[in-house]
Image (cartoon, helix red, strand yellow):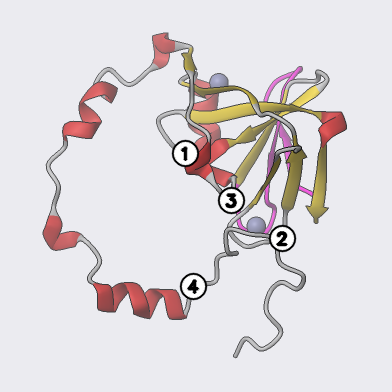
Amino acid sequence: MTIVHTGGCQCGAVRYRATGEIGFPHLCHCRMCQKAAGNYFMPLGGVKWANFSFSRGEPAWFQSSETVRRGFCEKCGTPLFYDGSSDHISITLGSLDDPQGLKPRLQTNLARKMPWFGELDGLQHDTAMDMTPDEETRIAASNHQHPDHDTDVWPPENRP
Ligand SMILES: [Zn+2]
Ligand SMILES: [Zn+2]
């Protein structure tokens, strides 16, 4: 059975589909990925262009260097792709519908890794700031993010 990976941006304007294994799942700590992600690293994995398609919309691209362009949703800004002008496209692993299903196996460009990165998991848990079940329900009721699966129609036509 062929594995099918789906994913997309938070607003649902860009959706993609990849078949087969996602290769080289890794965290890149380079400064360019940090800026592109607005985060401390970028989680990426590659699929051959031949096994990849856009199932809704297309991303906008920012040419971050001569050889690399980075794809994102023009409507909501979600970082989605890294295209290094090769036979494959890299996907941001957090944009997959099932991000838990693919664990990164490697990391790259450790020279720019945040020096305290390893301490993050030990940060104190501020339970007072956690969402209560009531808050979760309230937020879910007005959630405008696309769900973690393909949809035939988006946004829903019956939205108030
Ligand atoms: Zn979007
Ligand atoms: Zn990088």
Instruction: Mark 2 and ligand 1: say if the CB distance to the nearest ligand atom is below 8 Å.
Output: yes
Assess whether mark 2 and mark 1 are in contact (beta carbons under 8 angstroms): no
Please provide the residue range marked out in magenta: 57-78
Which amino acid, mark 2?
Answer: Ala
Which amino acid, mark 4?
Answer: Asn
Q: Earlier in the sequence, mark 1 or mark 3?
A: 1
Instruction: Mark 4 and ligand 1: say if the CB distance to the nearest ligand atom is below 8 Å.
Output: no
Residue under the point 55% across and 65% down: 145
Q: Earlier in the sequence, mark 4 or mark 3?
A: 3
Q: Position of residue 157 (x, y in %)?
A: 71, 84
> Is-magenta flag for residue 61?
yes
Ligand 2 is located in which of the four quadrants?
top right
Residue under the point 81% across and 53% down: 55
- C-alpha gap between disc 1 and disc 4: 22 Å
- Between label 2 and label 3, give the one nearer the viewer: 3
Residue under the point 71% across and 67% down: 151
Q: Which mark is residue 143?
A: 4
Q: Position of residue 7 (x, y in %)?
A: 65, 49
Assess whether mark 4 and mark 1 are in contact (beta carbons under 8 angstroms): no
User: Does residue 29 appear to the left or right of 93 in the view shown?
Assistant: left
Q: Return the residue at label 1.
A: 38
- Between label 1 and label 4, give the one nearer the viewer: 4
Q: Main secondary structure of the magenta part?
A: loop
Q: Earlier in the sequence, mark 2 or mark 4?
A: 2
Q: Return the residue at label 3.
A: 97
User: Does residue 109 appear to the left or right of 60 in the view shown?
Assistant: left
- Seen in the picture, residue 36 relative to 141 is either above or below; the reply is above
Within 10 Å of the Cα at label 1, are there few (<14), some (14-19), or many (20+) other Cα atoms? few
